[in-house]
Image (tube, rainbow, N blue to C red):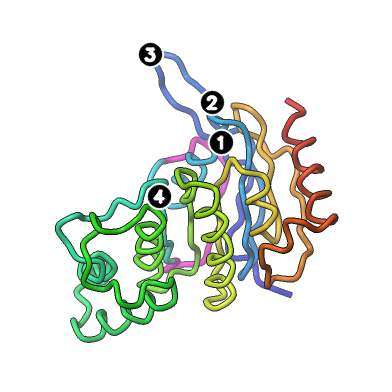
Amino acid sequence: MSDTILELKDVEVVYSLKEKEVKALERVSFKVEEGEFVSLVGPSGCGKTTLLKVIAGLIDFASGEIMKPEDFEIGYVFQEPTLLEWRKVIDNVVLPLEIKGIDKEQKYKKAKKLLKLVGLEGFEFVYPKDLSGGMKQRVAIARALIYDPELLLMDEPFGALDVPTRLKLNSELNRIWLRTNKTILFVTHNIQEAVFLSTKVIVLSRRPGRVKKIVGIDFPRKRDLKLLDREEYLEKVIEIRKIFGKG
């Protein structure tokens, strides 16, 4: 049995807005096991991104508990790649290690391995302006993995991409997950994407976001795009869509 790497108990987030308190998240509770791929889906504005930021320690929560191991490293892939345009691809990837003062030879060696992993071998010395949107997100994934985080948070990283590119990157992300055995918490509006990628899907309600249901996805971990045509895949998509639509 896998170890629990992250647990939330009754987490609530409250914002102050025009002298009023607005509850963004209400009594959110769930566990993430080591090596899982967990997706968060829910209506726009239900607090999915807020939840990732709370887990990352970027914003405070009003009440509840978040339990994770000490010295817990978290990688974060944002909706936009947020690459530094004046730095070459490899220099963007090594930035977190540069900030930590890691040896130059060591960090560049690791960056080259990660760029190969994400399918960007040969693009190490290209500038971001010369990359497609999908390639930029591959760079962002490599950068998030460079310091070997225990948990990778991904905030709708493929949302702005066209459908063919998104499908290709879904398949690539499945391969990267299998190769690295990372624990991933992934935000998406796309139910099909969530079912394809995940070991379980957490469905959130409208604001204030609550956990409506946690749906297990028991397909083999190694997946390809042929899964999208299978009856059991479509059944899971329909199941989650029905939960999603119940207010």
Amino acid at circle 3: Lys
Q: Position of residue 83 (x, y in %)?
A: 27, 55
Q: Is residue 110 above or below residue 128?
A: below
Q: Is residue 150 above or below residue 54?
A: below
Label drawn at residue 12: 1
Tell me the magenta residue range. Answer: 60-72
Q: Position of residue 160 (x, y in %)?
A: 45, 43
Is mark 1 in CB contact (under 8 Å) with mark 4?
no
Query: Where does label 2 land, which residue?
Result: 23
Question: Which badge, 4 or 3, is on the more N-terminal residue?
Answer: 3
Left or right: where does residue 212 sit relative to residue 14?
Answer: right
Asked if residue 71 is among those painted magenta in the image, a careful observer would answer yes
Quadrant where the C terminus sits is top right
Q: Mark 4 or 3, which is nearer the eye?
A: 4
* Residue at the image position 77 percent from the left and 56 percent from the top: 229
Query: Where does label 3 land, which residue?
Result: 18
Question: Which badge, 1 or 3, is on the more N-terminal residue?
Answer: 1
* Residue at the image position 48 percent from the left and 56 percent from the top: 153
Is mark 1 in CB contact (under 8 Å) with mark 2?
yes
Distance CA(mark 1)–CA(mark 2): 7 Å
Q: Residue 77 or 214: which is nearer the viewer?
A: 77
Distance CA(mark 1)–CA(mark 4): 22 Å
> Quick one: SS at disc 1?
strand
Amino acid at circle 4: Phe
> Quick one: SS at disc 2?
strand
Q: Residue 79 or 31: which is nearer the viewer?
A: 79
Question: Which badge, 1 or 2, is on the more N-terminal residue?
Answer: 1
Question: Which badge, 4 or 2, is on the more N-terminal residue?
Answer: 2
Q: Is residue 95 above or below residue 43?
A: below
